[in-house]
Image (cartoon, helix red, strand yellow):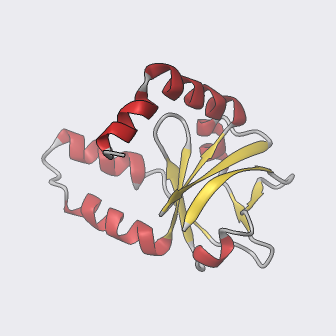
Amino acid sequence: MFLGTYIHRLDSKGRLTLPSKFRPFVGRELVVTKGMDRCLFLFPQERWQPLAQKLDALPLGKREARRARRWLLGNASVVSPDRMGRILLPAALREYAGIDQDVVIVGLETYMELWAPEAWHKELESAEESGLVEEQWELLEI
């Protein structure tokens, strides 16, 4: 289970060290791809497979289905943590997310999001200002 927010720094080769609390749950391979809102999604392989199967089942005749497949599958890379828990983030994905040195790693139960710090702070501010946080609690009926 991935929970919490961590800030880590890329090394000179573009490798990201995963939080030590997350490492027991990542397995041998992860899939990193473009996320929404200019972040990256990072899935353990076991969580990625059901999503990939759903994408594969989408009808090729529908434009939205093709776009979803291109976005998530066409930009995906399989990465394997080394013995120190580091993964190599592809340069094209780092560029898309605006990740230069520092990376905000957000644990979201079954997957992680990787953010440039500035983008993460803007996302948090936007969510608070929009009232979205309160709306979500209401949906959960808490």
In the image, residue 121 above or below residue 43? above
**Percent position of residue 18, x then y:** 72, 63
- What residue is rendered at 78% in x and 79% in y? 83
Outermost residue toward the front?
Answer: 142
- What residue is rendered at 60% in x and 79% in y? 28
**Percent position of residue 58, x then y:** 19, 56
Outermost residue toward the top?
Answer: 129
**Percent position of residue 141, x then y:** 31, 45
Q: Quadrant of the N terminus?
A: bottom right
Query: Which of the pair 127/105 is nearer the observer?
Result: 127
- What residue is rendered at 44% in x and 75% in y? 46
**Percent position of residue 108, x then y:** 52, 55
Tell me where residue 123 sits by quadrant.
top right
Query: Which of the pair 78/112 is nearer the observer?
Result: 112
- What residue is rendered at 48% in x and 44% in y? 35
Outermost residue toward the right?
Answer: 12
Residue 104 relative to residue 83: left or right: left
Looking at the rendered structure, the number of numbered marks drawn on it comes to 0
Tell me where residue 4 sits by quadrant.
bottom right
Query: Which of the pair 100/4 is nearer the observer?
Result: 4
